[in-house]
Image (cartoon, helix red, strand yellow):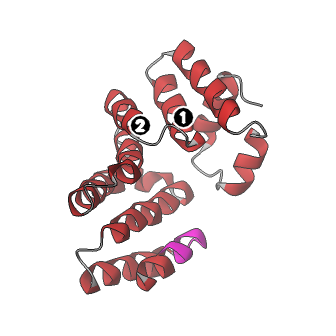
Amino acid sequence: MAYSLRGWIAAIKGQRDNAIADGKRAVSLDPNNALIYAHLVNINGFLILAKPELGASLAQENLAYAQKGMRLDPRRPQIYWFEEGLAYDLMGRYAEAVHAFNRSDQNDPYVHLGKLGAYSRLGREQDARAEAKEVLRLSPGFSVDQYQQRVPATGNQQFIADLRKAGLK
């Protein structure tokens, strides 16, 4: 677990090689720890935000990590449904992303942000606006500017545009 957390921190800092090495080390030491697979998805997520060109290559890997986490921890699949939704979104499989997000924790505003993005890319603007309302219901103080400060903006510009188009400020 410590290596997966260290890898996550390295990914946040943009230290790609260290992040990947620590993630792989975590799996080699504890291959049956479901939470490590969720951390691996997050490591890849930060790497993708920093370098969007990695998205396509890491999306399939993320999907496998999420599905492995669900197999190892079938009592808490909602954690992994969100990660699976993100993987499908990166792969351009937006309808499958929405399906996975719908199975995730509906009290999490990030789930609705994920659905908003997938609906936008599907051209379902009315559904995207409904998800924006849900984000604000769950997190009344949400702002796109604050989101951008927390999440690196590199490669994230289309998503930011989708948030604004759906009515988030």
Relative side of 37 to 164, left or right: left
**On residue 112, which mark appears?**
1
Residue 116: x and y in percent read 54, 29
Residue at (78, 31) in percent of width and height: 169
Q: Is residue 168 above or below residue 6?
A: above
**Looking at numbered disc 1 in the image, what kind of residue is underneath it?**
His
Residue at (28, 78) in percent of width and height: 27
Foreground pick, 91 / 133: 133
The residue that disc 2 covers is: 101
Viewport quadrant of the N terminus: bottom left
Residues rendered magenta in the picture: 8-14
- Could you tell me if the residues under marks 1 and 2 are in contact, i.e. CB atoms within 8 Å? yes
Q: Residues within 10 Å of mark 2 (few under 14, many from 20)?
A: many
In the current view of this chain or complex, which residue is farthest to the front?
75
> What secondary structure prevails in the magenta region?
helix
Residue 113: x and y in percent read 57, 37
Residue at (38, 81) in percent of width and height: 21
Residue at (64, 33) in percent of width and height: 135
- Whichever of labels 1 and 2 marks the residue nearer the N terminus, that label is 2
Foreground pick, 4 / 51: 4
Asked which secondary structure carries label 2, the reply is helix
